[in-house]
Amino acid sequence: MRARFLAILSAIVLVVTACQAAAPSASAPPPESAAPATAAPTAAPTAAPTPEPTVAARPSVLRVSRISDFLPSIHPVQLGTGNQELMADLVFSGLVDVDKDEVTILPDLATEWTASPDATTYTFKLNPAAVWSDGEPVTAADVVFTIAWSAQNPTAFKQLPVDMWVRVKGGAAVAGTKNIPEGVKAIDDHTVEITLESPNATFLRRIAGAVYYILPEHILKDLTAAEAETCEFCLGTAGVTIGSGPYDFETSISAGGATFKAKKGYWKGVDGPIDQIVYKIQESAVSVAQLAAGELDLTIRVPPAEGPGLAGVAGLKQLNVPGVGIFSINFNHNNTDKALRQAVAYAINRPQIIEQVLGGLATLNYTIPPGFKVYDDINKYEFDQDKAKALLAESSWDINSTFRLAILAEDPNFTVTAPALQQSLEAIGMKVEINALPTAPYSDLIQKTDDFDSYLSFGGSEGVGWYQSEIYFDCAGLGGSQFKLSAARGECIYSDQFKAAAAVVGDAQDRILHDLALDLNENLPEIYLWQPNYLHVYSDRLGGDFAIYPNERESFQKILDWTYAP
Amino acid sequence: MGAYVLRRLFISIPVLLGITLIGFVALKLSPGDPLVVSVNPEVLANLASNPEILEQERKRLGFDQPIFPNQYFRWLGNALQGDLGYSITSKRSIVHEIGSRLPQTLYLMLTSLALAILIGIPIGILTAVKQYSKTDYALNALAIFFASTPVFVLGLIGIYVFAVNLRLLPTSEIHTVGRTDILDALHHLILPASVLAIVQAAPLIRYTRASMLDVLHSDYVTTAHSKGLANRVVIIRHALRNGLIPIITIIAWLAPEAVAGAVITEQIFAWGGIGQLAVKAAGARDPSLMMGIILLTGTAVLIVNIIADVAYAVADPRVRYVRGT
């Protein structure tokens, strides 16, 4: 009798479950109800929604998630992922911040600043009210310490370079010493003067990035380069890692994220608008489920394909914007020549791939770095198979050999588009072999071998401005190995042009950038294909000056101006 | 019994060493530079443009020495002193990494295993006793259905129905932010533990049924019945005890997961346990962390096997260790 009851009960549970599972699909709204399909990056919502009076009050807790790229450190030597930069923006302060237009420089620790006419010397007045979490004042000595430590330990920076600090006058000379570069001086407790080795008009914008935040000298003055990777302060430890930003760590950084609490009586005169921020580092599928279940208030970088499915969730808004990262084909310049690279560019029908493979969720690029102006005389390499075939014949490429294209096996950005690119190249007579590899072998292949002809890459923030591309062409940094330019041409061909452009402004800068764009456009050290869209999903409880920046890593820089209706 | 356990423990030591040696060599020989994967792909080229950093790091971590015996014995010596090294990705000690996640895994896995036993064995006995009845057919069909349904399918259905649609249960994670009370923890446990329990109970039902059917047709059971003993007494006291041995084997087979973590379930439910850690360690090719997990898993398997051997002896007094001649 009991056994029979059990069987009947099981059947009922199954039927009920099946019915419940089927129900929501019928009521799901059509995809077109998704929020702005291709809103301009600066069109982030700024109006505070009026909270509905019937909504039950919740504690002021903001639950944020972002994709799971993770490095545990918060020290600039290991700062490389967007998650780290966003957390650093909560806990630390730089000399200056940047507004959501990614151009306007805002005060942070510095309340005012001046630049010499030749863009070589910058003087900053620090806010005398600024204090660290332990109550110690933030002074010019902290700024001098931060810059000097960076210049003394340039090889300690294993992620993003802090080349603006290294390029202060005398910066190179103090590497490996304990000396202060002659280009950085504390004029008084709250005034600091920074003189660069050469003029740089992008200096203020560059130092608004999270990696340039100011470190507390009284905590870290004896820190060695090796210790900077593992010290408790450096790992983002609650109660140990102190900053001058509006939030403190409440729980330490782990692979799952961290939590932050707002400082009371913050020195800027206004406290963080949200008492607690729960920052989750998680797989996008987990975030999507939590968004749908109302367990998250903000997810940065949801896969765009999830947009229609989340469109019907009450209380959520979407921002679908062209990303600032670039998807590109890179070459082994030891093995390929310009004619082959141009042939590849002409062979790819980029608008068609964007439309048919990516569902229109990407912005076409005209084969120059995305932060550059699209000059009228740029060759757009519009799809032309005949021209591609002619260039292929003209090139030194052996048509019978296999063109080895390496891709990341774990990233849908790669796996979805690689077959389309393969077909495009095979259509002009090339034999293409896709080599899909996990991250480590993929990195090894590119870094340490010549056993590839090309590889797909995606990321960066070049779309923010032309200067964001500089590190990728710097022969002392990324460019030397990423593009193998030095090996191919025997000289540092683009780095000097970037530096020259940074040294001037206005028409003079535009002329240099125009020449640089034409050179890159002609030689194609890499073929910039498209900028995949970013989808951000957020609660309508967020308002005020809440915005997701085009470079979403910088979105917390103005968190004091947000509002949140719990 | 004590000597028996000691003997089994003694035999386990070389087995454990073998596991760690094979794991260590295999990890070292696998493609990919563990140093490189600790760098963001967007800027990984920066590292390669500073080869001196790579070499310094390699030397510091002993990666430039022969894998065997140098690197292995260095690792083993440290491991015996409780030092399993540091994760190259998190920069924290392996003991900390594993120690901080093991309780979560034990919490989930032991609960699900207990549920699976509570569901699986009674249903297995029931289907054996009611062989060829409608109950038997229905419960067997369910068991086969759940045994052949991948755990991620059940997990996703569970999330969709009970969390996203009905909003009765949370989608994932161990507790709600800001809450550490037991009720909240139990609330979060229901879905993943139920999914795992169902999946684990399914084979248990099948094996219990088969084992009990063997025993129920034995002469001594017929004799017990003919002596006028109550059916319940015959099943519980006479049949079940003898039918337990294959069931203990299945439980011993399921139990190491209680320590090693259920990789897929922990991923789906963002359960910060050892299973999720293992996935991250493999993805990041974090050799020290992977070795720590191999050591933990290997130890768990061996301990559970010893416990199973003891359980055999308790369940069946005929099972005793006999010294070879």
Image: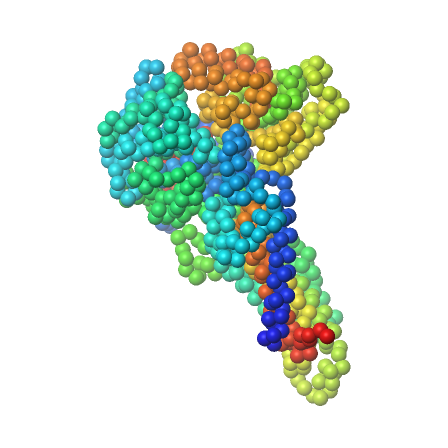
Q: Is residue A264 left or right of residue A27?
A: left
The residue depicted at 57 percent of the width and 24 percent of the height is A483
| Whether residue B273 is visible | no
Tell me if residue B240 comes above or below residue A331 in the rendering: below
Residue A77 found in image quarter:
top left
Q: Is residue B253 left or right of residue B103?
A: right
| Whether residue A510 is visible | yes
The residue depicted at 59 percent of the width and 54 percent of the height is B294
- Residue A38: x and y in percent read 51, 29
Name the outermost residue toward the bottom.
B227
- Residue A515: x and y in percent read 51, 12
Residue A199 found in image quarter:
top left
Q: Nearer the viewer, residue A283 or A76?
A: A76
The residue depicted at 29 percent of the width and 24 percent of the height is A193
Tell me if residue A294 comes above or below residue A519 in the rendering: below
- Residue B151: x and y in percent read 62, 54
Q: Nearer the viewer, residue B246 or A421?
A: B246
Tell me if residue A306 comes above or below residue A239 in the rendering: above
